[in-house]
Amino acid sequence: MNEKAYKQKIKAALDDCLSGINDLPSQRDMILRKARNEKKEERKMKKIPLSILLAAILVLGTTVGGLALADYYSVRDYLANGAPSESFEAGIVEVNQTKTNDLISMTVGDAIFDGRTLAFTLELNMPENASSVYLSSLEIIIAQAGKPEEKRIGLGWSGDGIYDGFLYPSLNVFEREPNMNRMGISQSFWGIDPEKPVQWKVTFRVLRPIWKIENDTQPSFELEKLLPWKEAIQTAYERQTLRAENGKYLERFLAAMQPPEGVMRIDWAQMPYTDRLVACGAMQEEEPLTFEFTTQPVHAVSLLKEPLQFSFDECTAELQSMIQTSRYISCDLVIRTKDSAYHSRYRYVTAYDQNGEWIPSYEDSWFDSYYTDQEGEYRLHKVLDCSKNLESITFHIGENTETYSWKKDAGKEWPAFTVQLPKQ
């Protein structure tokens, strides 16, 4: 190959590579100067060997590819509103897997495991104007070194995701807007060693509706007591029609369904709802979609060098420990009242960030996580969400916490103390 051909190949490689680095002008100019053999600082550069130039192009191409933004829905948006803390960012595992069958395409973007809760993102895509399909969780298999493989069947998902199952796309028009195909899914687990990697294998069921589906617009409260609703369910069943609550969920309809001919009532009562759809012929099972990924060990960091003491007119507070993982800060507190008359007044705690915004706690419940060693003393184990950046935490002690207002209640200033967090 002659010199002209070499130059043409180099130019083509440079054009392909440099097209993605508009935000890296220094590297772009450097490569162009070397390729054109231009002067730098008033002295002529030596001719660059072809092998070195091609190596530089390959390295630069790798760098540019690594800087590209992920083109999927992320747990950064699902849990941290696009502004994750450094500890949260460090715990994220990229999955970026897309699985497809004849009906739907599903993508798992990324995941994070904090030692107890697995969270990941899901994106659904179907051909335009395609009929709805029914999606539900089938099973999840958990594997860890030194432990037998564990299979869990029929999971219920929390968060924005899958419960017993749902129709996609929804029959409601407003749920067909952009980004309604993106969701975050969370599930809690026990018995997993947080100090070891975890291999996850998550499988989703995909069902093709055979029966007609109608939008159930009946009010959701006390429907079991409404005779017209019961009659409507029975009529729909006889007409081989499914009624979807809010255009999406079938649990109410499936709970009220009578067993089909040939199925014993006791077996029907114990049958998962998704299996009922197949057993009665309302839907047909299609190829399931399975995703496999591994989350890394959870690293815990102590935020306190020693316990912190706070004293107020009617009670004292001791913050004994604060342990941070990728997603949560676990806090151990002791509240002691100075008079038995105040025993029940200071048994609840809520928390706020540096902007005065309420910090969600694990499973959004701070009210049932306390126990009493002795009268007037409450020991609380609180788990705060730290997926977003936290500079400080203000703990509010008081009985009226359901409104999450720590300023005043009936003219009384409630005790509060603030802890500054170490910079990440």
Image (cartoon, rainbow, N blue to C red):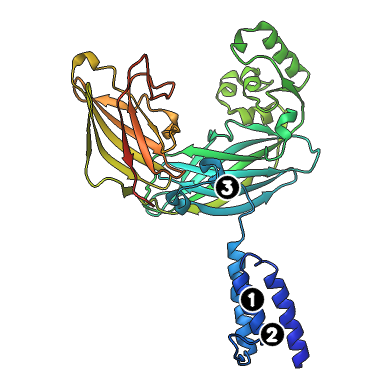
- Residue 57 visible: no
Quadrant for residue 122, please give it.
top right
What's the mark number on residue 36? 2
Mark 2 or mark 3, which has the lower sequence index?
2
The residue at which mark 1 appears reads as 29
Classed neighbour count for the residue bearing mark 3: other residues with Cα under 10 Å, few (<14), some (14–19), many (≥20): many
Label 2 crowd (10 A; few <14 / some 14-19 / many >=20): few
Q: CA distance from mark 1 to mark 2?
A: 10 Å
Q: Is residue 93 left or right of residue 386?
A: right
Q: Is residue 108 above or below residue 239?
A: below
Q: In terms of image quadrants, where is residue 175?
A: top right
* SS under mark 1: helix
Q: Nearer the viewer, residue 361 or 124?
A: 361
Residue shown at 29% from the left, 22% from the top? 347
Tell me if residue 18 can be seen.
yes
Residue shown at 64% from the left, 22% from the top: 254
Q: Position of residue 266 (x, y in %)?
A: 56, 20
Please name the amino acid that badge 3 sits on.
Ser
The N terminus, quarter of image: bottom right
How far apart are labels 1 and 3 at the CA level? 34 Å
Query: Which secondary structure lies at badge 3?
Result: loop
Q: Residue at x 60, y 53 (%)?
A: 96
The three-letter code of the residue at mark 1 reads Asp
Sequence-first tag of 1 and 2: 1
- Label pair 2/3, CB-CB below 8 angstroms: no
Q: Position of residue 338 (x, y in %)?
A: 18, 21
SS type, badge 2: helix
Q: Which residue is mark 3?
A: 74
Which residue is drawn at the image coordinates 50% and 46% (left, top)?
141
Question: Considering only vertical position in the picture, is 32 above or below 322?
Answer: below
